[in-house]
């Protein structure tokens, strides 16, 4: 478990570094905004940066969540069934809060739901004709 904690802390540090770097770039960009040449390109770059930052921040939140669960000894147990999540799975996807069984059940349910709404749609189209 210490191994996973170290992994999470390392990734957290890398993410924070990343976010800091991007925030720094943004400040620089804002200072350069005076000359309008290439400003549309810069605008796109900035939007991409913001998008990436959102993703980084979401991941950071996930890591902090996992570290918190680790501190309260909830980490490594499935949210659904309370079973131990295998160490192999935790190493591969440390931010998961479900065991492989519950995860695949959930994915199956989601797929079934999609198929269901598609069927609804089809029958509606047919009755409209
Ligand atoms: Zn489970």
Image: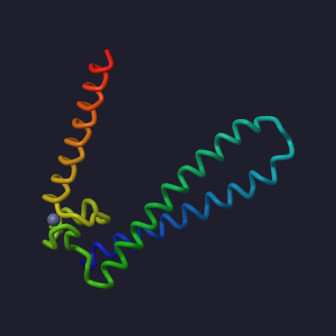
In the orientation shown, which residue stands out farthest toward the top?
129
125 is higher (above) or lower (below) than 64: above
**Outermost residue, right side:** 34
Q: Residue at x 62, y 45 (%)?
A: 47
**Quarter of the rendered image showing ligand 1:** bottom left
Given the current orientation, which residue lies at the most extreme bottom position? 72
In this view, the residue in front, 83 or 29, is: 83
Q: Position of residue 115 (x, y in %)?
A: 22, 35
Would residue 45 be found to the left or right of residue 71 on screen?
right
To which quarter of the image does residue 117 belong? top left
- Image quadrant assignment for residue 44: top right
Residue pictured at 27% horizontal, 75% vertical: 3
Q: Is residue 126 left or right of residue 59?
A: left
Q: Position of residue 85 (x, y in %)?
A: 17, 68
Q: How many marks?
A: 0
- Residue 68 position (above or below residue 37): below
Q: Position of residue 31 (x, y in %)?
A: 81, 54
Identified at 65% across, 47% down, the residue is 46
Q: Nearer the viewer, residue 107 or 31?
A: 107
In this picture the colour scheme is: rainbow
Image point 34% across, 72% down: which residue? Answer: 66
Q: From what the image shows, is residue 70 above or below residue 22? A: below
Is residue 125 found left or right of 52 in the rendered image? left
Viewer-nearest residue: 30 or 58: 58
Q: Which quadrant of the rendered structure holds the N terminus?
A: bottom left
- Tell me if 65 is positioned left or right of 42 in this view: left
Q: Quadrant of residue 99?
A: bottom left
- The quadrant of the image that shows the C terminus is top left
């Amino acid at each position: 478990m210490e191994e996973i904690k170290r992994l999470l802390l390392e990734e957290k540090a890398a993410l924070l570094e990343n976010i800091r770097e991007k925030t720094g770039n943004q400040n620089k960009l804002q200072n350069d905004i005076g000359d309008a040449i290439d400003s549309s390109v810069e605008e796109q770059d900035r939007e991409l940066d913001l998008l990436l930052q959102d993703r980084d921040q979401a991941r950071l939140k996930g890591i902090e969540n996992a570290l918190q669960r680790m501190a309260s000894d909830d980490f490594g147990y499935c949210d659904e069934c309370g079973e131990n999540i295998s160490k192999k799975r935790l190493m591969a996807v440390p931010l998961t809060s479900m065991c492989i069984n519950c995860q695949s059940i959930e994915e199956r349910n989601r797929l079934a739901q999609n198929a269901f709404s598609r069927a609804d749609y089809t029958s509606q189209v047919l009755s409209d004709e």
